Amino acid sequence: MPLIGDKPTIGIAHVAYRFGDRMQARGIDLPFIEMRTREDFAARIGEIDVLLVSGYWNNALAPQAKRLKFIQSISAGVDQYDPAVLRAHGIRLASAAGGNANAVSEHAISLILAISRRLPEARDNQAKKFWRGMQGDFWKREDELGGKTLVVVGLGRIGGRLARLARAFGMHVIGLKRDPSTGAEGADEVHAIAKLHEVLPRADYVALCCPLTPETQGLIGTAELGLMKPSAHLVNVARGKVVKEAELIAALNAGTIKSAALDCVEEEPLPESSPLWTMPSVFITPHTGGETCAYEDNVLDFLMENLGRLQRGEDVLLNQVV
């Protein structure tokens, strides 16, 4: 039996994304409501049959969502949703996993290149109109990626594509995943996540591409950072809470590792009081790894596929969670 009718009202709850514009441009003839604030979202959730949302979702709103039958998450991560709450209210959920694989993997390799070539420092020097002289100190020079070892933690669609991009630069890639038997996904080596401590001493770069789960929360802390080379770099395009932030700050201050490039942090937006803002060994991007000109269309592809399945009465969704 179809769960969704032919003309469901689509709710779009996001501060910035232009899903309504892209629906109209693509000729998707469905009514939609755009909600740009949490307050507007909470006030109008009862009018919605299908919801596009990510960070605005609050499980406490489920009882008010009397018409809601399906949530197409805007994000690949779904840790903000309580499956038990959704099931209790008859709400299906699918993620956008894979929709940002190109974007986030390209962002990750961009961060690796940026810290290797010291681009943040060059931009700062440009703002100061300072032409840096040539460096006699190896430690202060730009570096090359060829021959370096990259450890990719989380060898899914994002991590797998990052592995292939890194190998194009001549890097040796070690991938870590829950089940190594499912394939190397472009890495030179693949191991279980349990081997993390064994491979960290080999890493010149460690890229976190894993989802936030009970197993990965706080995965990187003092012990793990202490196993890395003093010349190594940490790149996080996963979730902020995969890293114990206070312990990372301490390790950077102590010179335990050389630098960190972070697209996500524990608390977002990053508080003004955070020392990360002013640490010369830290490069920050504001969780924009997946945010490209193609993102709305990528998510709408998932939405339309899943709407079709629900309208046909099919049980299995693309990227089904609930």
Image (cartoon, rainbow, N blue to C red):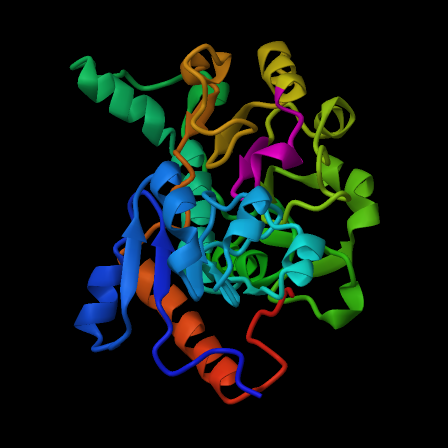
**Is 242 in the magenta?**
yes
Q: Which residue occupies the foreground of this view, 139 or 124?
A: 124
* Quadrant position of residue 272: top left
Q: Taking the image as drawn, is residue 188 in sight?
A: no
Q: Is residue 285 left or right of residue 96?
A: left
Up the image or down, 279 lies above or below 111; here it is above
Q: Is residue 89 left or right of residue 306?
A: right
Q: Indicate the position of residue 316 as horizontal and vertical percent values.
A: 62, 80
Residue drawn at 78 percent across, 25 percent down: 223
What is the span of residues highlighted in magenta in the rendered image? 233-245
Image quadrant occupied by the C terminus: bottom right
Q: Which residue occupies the foreground of this view, 45 or 271?
A: 45
Residue drawn at 47 percent across, 84 percent down: 311
**Is 59 in the magenta?**
no
* Quadrant position of residue 119: top left
Q: Indicate the position of residue 218 as horizontal and vertical percent values.
A: 71, 32
Up the image or down, 134 lies above or below 284; here it is above
Q: Taking the image as drawn, is residue 278 in sight?
A: yes
Up the image or down, 58 lies above or below 89; here it is above
Q: How many marks?
A: 0
Q: Indicate the position of residue 175 as horizontal and vertical percent values.
A: 68, 55
Q: Is residue 291 left or right of residue 195?
A: left
Residue drawn at 71 percent across, 70 percent down: 183
Q: Indicate the position of residue 168 as horizontal and vertical percent values.
A: 47, 60
Image quadrant occupied by the N terminus: bottom right
Q: Which residue occupies the foreground of this view, 170 or 69?
A: 69
